Image (tube, helix red, strand yellow):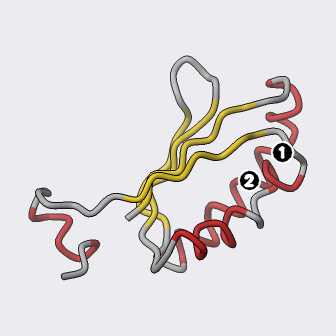
Amino acid sequence: MFIISLTYKSSIDNVERLIPQHNIFLNKHYESGKFIASGRKEPRTGGIIIANAESKNEIKQIISEDPFYIHQVADYDITEFIPSKYNENFNFFIED
């Protein structure tokens, strides 16, 4: 699993302009099963995406499709983690 932390490096006006395209990007990867949860940070300095992918390279490929990445309005920090404890309702996200 991966935590993708976005940090805006552009004005909120530039970010807002790209929100509709960013939502299309998010929806595509929710439908593919890659994204588990996402949302904005508070205070509004960026966002977080929790993803389930095979590798960090796959995450980098996915990120390259994000309008925030394409238009250079956000930086991305990728953290891979291996869940050792989790709510049993999330079993289907965890690969043994």
In the displayed structure, does residue 43 sit left or right of residue 60?
left
Q: In the rendered image, which residue does mark 2 sit on?
A: 22
What residue is at 18 percent from the left and 82 percent from the top?
96
Q: Amino acid at mark 1?
A: Leu
Quadrant (top left, top right, bottom left, bottom right) of the N terminus: bottom left
- Residue 89 is tagged as none
Neighbour class for label 2 at 10 Å: few (<14), some, many (≥20)?
A: some
Residue found 65% across the figure and 66% down from its top: 60
Quarter holding residue 90 = bottom left
Q: Is residue 89 left or right of residue 5?
A: left
Q: CA distance from mark 2 to mark 1?
A: 6 Å
Residue 14 position in % (x across, y down): 88, 32
Residue found 80% across the figure and 34% down from its top: 16
Q: State yes or no: discs 2 and 1 in contact (Cβ < 8 Å).
A: yes
Residue 31 or 66: which is nearer the viewer? 66
Percent x, y of residue 23: 69, 55
In terms of image quadrants, where is residue 11? top right
Q: Secondary structure at mark 1?
A: helix
Residue 91: x %, y % from top left:
17, 72
Q: Amino acid at mark 2?
A: His
Write down the residue under mark 1: 18
